[in-house]
Image (cartoon, helix red, strand yellow):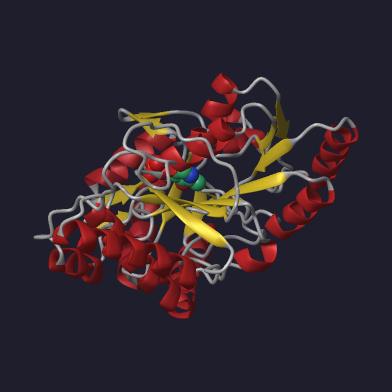
């Protein structure tokens, strides 16, 4: 099988697997006083440190471990329900749905046809809220998971500082993909996730500036400094930290190799009259959103699958049903484009041969 759906989830890296296996016999209740408890605690604190060090933010930030990026995003929005929430209409549903259902004072920044959020409107809105003494949380993703388009996060951060807003950024698609400048951008909260970078499922981190106020969603024994109760998922956390360490230390090679694959693929597809969403925008090197006019995404996915190629629709896809992409809709694309777009997401484990096979299959499907 050819796996081109790494932005949905990426298989566990061999080194991560080996690292987790080293500790598989440690009974893993990090709250226990006995030797295994102390060992688990040490491993969890080391993992926290490894993540912060690899992201170069060890001095000012702390990590709350939890189960998924969805949980991180729910936690941050639920922590600010008494404030105004400012988000965009291209966020992941783990932001949009909790904002829709739980927030009273919510504001959406539209996205421009180019795929980035409208900074002019954002400035206008933040100024209005600021002038009315409204406290606010801004939550904007670092890069979009469907198009790969990188958001102007430095400028967003500057606006937040100017108008006294806290900033959360969902960065789970960008870790290990592009150089990150969290230290200078200085968001108050950052979401990152293990299984998007070849770590185990079941671990994610809500990274927060020291001294920030978060409200726990899960109550119980008070683990994670009272922010997220429940026995920590030691083995997933160990694997997560190892994955962060690997991807951050192979960033140059990753960017070079994956960009080559992506660029070859897109150049070849353009010769077959594909449309690439956001082709001229600054994008993550691994994501390509490709339109095959006249063929629905659903039909494409089935045909690729029958040809041994796993692709994601990019749009919200649960229980096997593909929804319409709210991201492409927000960019203003008509239904015939939205319904014919698929997301290809590559990794450094893919090869040029796989790309060639994908392109020839794509062209066969387009002509059938
Ligand atoms: N945020 C972004 C940008 C994502 O791409 C995803 C998953 O695709 C999530 C959040 C949710 O991740 P999870 O399903 O691991 O909770």
What is the residue that sits farthest to the right in this orientation? Answer: 131
Name the quadrant containing residue 104: top right
Judge whether residue 5 can be spotted in this image. Answer: yes
Vertical order, 62 against 180 (above or below): above
**Which residue lies at the image location 74% right of the left edge and 52% below the top edge?**
156
Expressed as whole percent of the image width and height from the top left, the position of residue 51 reads: 43, 65
Rendered view: 258 above or below 297: below
Quick check: which quadrant has ligand 1?
top left
Look at 12% across and 54% down and name the residue there: 27
Total number of numbered labels?
Answer: 0
Seen as rendered, the residue at the extreme left is 25
| Residue closer to the observer: 308 or 257 | 257
Q: Is residue 288 left or right of residue 13?
A: right
Residue at the spot 76% in from the left edge and 49% down from the top edge: 160
The C terminus, quarter of image? top left
Given residues 68 and 12, the one toward you in this image is: 68
272 on left or right of 110: left
Left or right side of 224 for 12: left
Q: Position of residue 96 (x, y in %)?
A: 56, 31
Closest to the observer, 277 or 68: 68
- For the residue pair 143 and 276, the one nearer the viewer reads as 143
Q: Is residue 277 left or right of residue 176?
A: right
Which image quarter holds the N terminus?
bottom left
Answer yes or no: is residue 294 visible.
no
> Which quarter of the picture shows residue 249?
bottom left
Position of 88 relative to 39 (above/below): above
Q: Position of residue 179 (x, y in %)?
A: 56, 71
User: Residue 355 placed where, x, y %?
Assistant: 36, 64
């Amino acid at each position: 099988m050819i796996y081109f759906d790494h932005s949905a989830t990426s298989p566990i890296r061999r080194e991560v697997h080996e690292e987790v296996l080293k500790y598989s016999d440690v009974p893993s209740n990090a709250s226990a006083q006995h030797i295994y408890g102390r060992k688990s605690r040490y491993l969890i604190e080391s993992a926290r440190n490894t993540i912060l060090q690899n992201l170069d933010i060890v001095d000012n930030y702390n990590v709350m471990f939890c189960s998924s990026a969805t949980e991180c995003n729910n936690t941050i929005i639920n922590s600010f329900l008494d404030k105004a929430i400012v988000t965009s209409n291209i966020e992941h549903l783990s932001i949009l749905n909790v904002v829709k259902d739980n927030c009273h004072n919510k504001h959406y920044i539209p996205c421009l046809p180019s795929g980035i959020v409208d900074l002019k409107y954002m400035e206008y809105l933040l100024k209005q809220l600021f002038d009315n003494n409204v406290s606010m949380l801004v939550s904007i993703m670092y890069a979009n998971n469907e198009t790969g388009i990188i958001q102007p996060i430095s400028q967003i951060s500057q606006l937040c500082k100017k108008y006294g807003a806290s900033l959360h950024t969902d960065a789970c698609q960008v870790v290990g993909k592009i150089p990150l400048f969290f230290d200078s951008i200085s968001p108050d909260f950052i979401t990152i996730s293990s299984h998007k970078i070849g770590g185990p499922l079941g671990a994610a981190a809500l990274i927060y500036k020291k001294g920030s106020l978060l409200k726990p969603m899960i109550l119980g024994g008070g683990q994670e400094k009272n922010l997220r109760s429940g026995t920590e998922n030691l083995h997933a956390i160990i694997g997560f930290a190892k994955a962060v360490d690997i991807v951050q230390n192979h960033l140059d090679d990753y960017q070079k190799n994956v960009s080559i694959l992506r660029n070859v693929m897109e150049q070849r597809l353009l010769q077959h009259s594909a449309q690439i969403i956001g082709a001229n925008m600054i994008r993550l090197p691994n994501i390509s959103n490709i339109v095959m006019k006249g063929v629905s995404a659903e039909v494409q996915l089935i045909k690729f699958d029958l040809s041994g190629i796993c692709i994601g629709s990019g749009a919200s896809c649960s229980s096997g049903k593909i929804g319409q992409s709210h991201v492409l809709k927000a960019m203003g694309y008509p239904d015939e484009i939205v319904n014919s777009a698929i997301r290809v997401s590559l990794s450094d484990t893919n090869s040029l041969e796989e790309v060639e096979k994908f392109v020839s299959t794509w062209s066969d499907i387009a002509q059938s």
